[in-house]
Amino acid sequence: MSEQDPGPRGDDRRRDDRGAPRGDRRGPGGDRGGRPRDARDRDRRDDRPRGGDRDRRDDRPRRDDRDRDRGGRTGSGWGGDRGRDEQRGDRGDRRPRDDRARGDRPDRGGRDDRRPSHSRSGGDVARRRDTGAPRDGGFRGRDQRDGGDGRPRRDRDTGRSPRRDDDRRDGGRRERTAGPRNAGPPRGRVGPGRPPAVDPARQAAYDLLTAVREREAYANLALPGILRRYRLRDRDAALATELGYGTLRAQGLLDTVIDACTDRPLSKIEHPLLDALRLGAYQLLRTRVPAHAAVSTCVELVRGDHGSQSAGFVNAVLRRIGEHDEAEWLDRLAPDPAEDPVGNAALRHAHPRWIAQAFADSLGDTGEELTAALAADDARPRVHLLARPGEISAEELALATGGEEAPWSPYGVHLEPGSGDIGELDAVAEGLALVQDEGSQLVAAALARAELLGEDTGRWLDLCAGPGGKASLLGGLVAAHGGTLDAVESSERRAGLVREATADLPVTVHVADGREAPLPEGGFDRVLVDAPCTGLGALRRRPEARWRRRPEDTAALTRLQRELLVAALGHVRPGGVVAYVTCSPHVSETAGVVGRIVGREDRPGPAGPVEQLDARACLPADLPGLGDGPAVQLWPHRHGTDAMFLALIRKPLG
C-alpha cells in the first residue's frame, strides 16, 4: 500500500485464508497451531513440504502474489508497502514474523545491555506510549495477558492466540501521518521469486546514498540524474530529495542511535545494510512517515539483494529505534549540555563536534547563537537562483518560476525546498538563470562595488573560477560596462563548465594553476579569489560534506589560500581591489589567512603594503548582523545565506 493508503492501524499482519494472523497460530515450541503435532501432520497434504523443510520450494504463486501481479489489492493494502518481512515466497516455509518474540529466534541485532535506561519519572517511555501490548521486535518482558509462561493465552475453542488489535506495527505512534506522500501503488515485481519493488521515491533516495558512498559523488550533482532515471516529479521527487538529503545530513545522529540498538559495531555492518538502516532511522526520527512504512520499505530494500537474514537484522534494529522519538533518544545519548554544550549541540543538530567547535570559535558563542547556527545548517535550505544580468531580471525570474525575489541580492530569487529538478525550469534550461546561493551573489557583487583608486580600465580577473557561477555574474556585470573578464581554473573539466556558463559573455578562460597563471602582472582592476576551502559554510546544501571533511584538512587548505591571495595581489594594479572569499566560517581560513597577508603598517605582509577596506560598505545597507568589520561573515541563521566570508584588500597607489 502507498503512503496515501496507510491501511489499518491495528493488526496489519498478513492473514491466512481463514482470516487469522499467521503469527498467532503458533503453539509452544515453534508449532504452527494450537492442535497437537500429530493431528496437524495427518491433515497435511502428502505433497506439501513441511514447515521445517527449508530446502523444498513450491513454485506455485500464493493467492496474494497472483492478486498483486494483476495489480489487485491484498487484504491489507498494496502488497509492497507493508513490507514482506512476514511474507515468504514458498508455501512450505511459513515461518512466523521475524519480529515476534520467541525463544528460538536468531539474533535480531538488538541487545539489552546497550539500551540506555530512561531516567524520567513515569517509567519506560515505550511502556508509557503503548497501551499494554508488546511492541513488535522490542518487547523484552512478559505479556500482561500471557498464560504465565511468557506465551500468549489460547482461545479454549479454537486453540489460537487471541487477536491483538493494539499490537501495533507502527510502534504506537497514532498521531503520525505521512509527510510528502508517494503517489500510486508499487510497480509490481522485480523478477521471479523477488519481492515487490520498493516505491521509486525511496529507491531513489537509497540509490543516492549508494552513489555518495561508493563513488564519493556529490549529492547535489548525483540526485538530478537519479530523479530522471526513476521519472520522479513533483511530490515524488520532493520525497526522494527529502529522504536522501535528510539522511545524509543527519548521518552522525543516526549512526549514534543505530549503534545503541545493535550488537554489531557500525564498522562491521555491511555498507548497503547500514544505508538502509540510516534511511529507515531518518524516517522514524525526523519525518511523519508512518513507522510501519518506514520499516517495511527499508526491509525490502535489503531483502532482494541480501536475503532474509539481513532483512531480519534491519527489521529488528529499526523496530528498536522506533521505540523512542528523536527527542527521547537525544535525552539518552547526548552529552550533558552543562558540561559539554558544544558536544550536546553537535549531536542534536547532526554535526561533527570539530565543526560545531569551529562555528563556536567564529561566533564567539557556545550557547543560543551556536545552537541557532547549527539548527539553520541542519534545516532544508531554500533554493537560490541567480537571474543573469542582461538576460532576465529577478522580478521576471520570480514570475517565471513561482519563486520570490531575494531580500538582499538584486539578482536573486528564492524557491521553496523540494522544488524538484531545477534543471527542468525553462529559465534554467535556457541559460537565463542558474543555481547560486544569495551569499555568493552578494560577495561577488561587493567586488564590483568596491572603490578603486585611479583609472578603471575594465579588466577583471576570477582566479579560481570553476565551476563558473561567480564568473557568470561577474561576466554579466563587466559586460554592461564594456569590460572583460579573465577566468582561471586549474581543472580542465571545471574549466569546461566555466566556458559553458560564460559562453555569451566577454570572458576568456585559462586552464592553469591560479598561483602560476600566465597573466600580466598588475594588469587587473578587480580580482576575485574564491579560494578552495573546507566548505563548512555550505553544509546545508552539501549534506554529505560534513562527514567527509576532517580537522586536518584545514592545514593544507590555509597554505593554498595564502598562496592564492598573494598571487592575486600580484595581478591587481596599484589602486585595484582583491576580494578574498571563502564558503567557510573557520577562523583559520578567514581572518587567519587575511591577517597573515595584510600585516601591519610597520611590517607589511608578503604581498607588500596593502590596506583592508570595510566590506560592509559594499553590501546592502539594511543587511543586519555584519559585525564590527572590516571583513564580513554571513550566516544562515542571520541572513538566510550560506556562511560566506568576504575581505576586500586594496593595493595602494604608487
Image (cartoon, grey):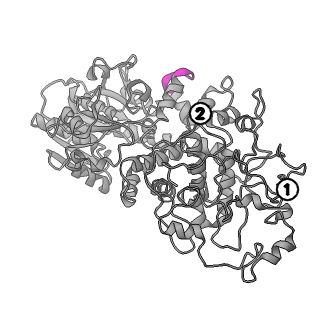
User: Which residue corresponds to mark 2?
Assistant: 348
Q: State the residue in front, 4 or 569.
A: 4
Q: Residues within 10 Å of mark 2 (few under 14, many from 20)?
A: many
Q: Is there any visible trace of residue 409 in the rendered image?
A: yes
**Count of picture labels:** 2
Q: Amino acid under label 2?
A: Arg
Task: Let me know if residue 363 is in the magenta part.
Answer: yes
Task: Confirm whether residue 462 shows in the render.
Answer: no
Q: Provide residue 574's location: percent of width, then percent of height.
A: 21, 29
Q: What SS does tag 1 mark?
A: loop
Disc 1 versus disc 2: nearer the observer: 1
Q: Residue 531's image quarter?
A: top left
Q: Looking at the picture, which amino acid does disc 1 mark? A: Arg
The residue segment tinted magenta is 361-368
- Identify the residue under disc 1: 156
Q: Does residue 67 sit above or below 161 in this rendering?
A: below
Please tell me which residue lies in front, 401 or 526: 401
Specify the farthest residue to the right: 148
Residue beneath the point at 67% across and 34% down: 328
Which residue does the image show at 63% across and 53% down from the upper left? 12
Residue 603: image location, x then y, percent: 38, 23
Q: Quadrant of the C terminus?
A: top left
Drawn side of residue 80 relative to residue 494, left or right: right
Residue drawn at x 63%, y 33% as measured from the top left? 327
Reply above or below: 203 against 533. below
- Kind of element beneath mark 2: helix
How far apart are the alpha carbons under marks 1 and 2? Answer: 51 Å
Give x and y (percent) for residue 351.
55, 37
Among all residues in the image, which is located at the extreme bottom?
47
Q: Are marks 1 and 2 in contact (CB under 8 Å)?
A: no
Task: Answer few, some or many: residues within 10 Å of disc 1's Cα (few below 14, many 20 plus, some between 14 and 19).
Answer: few
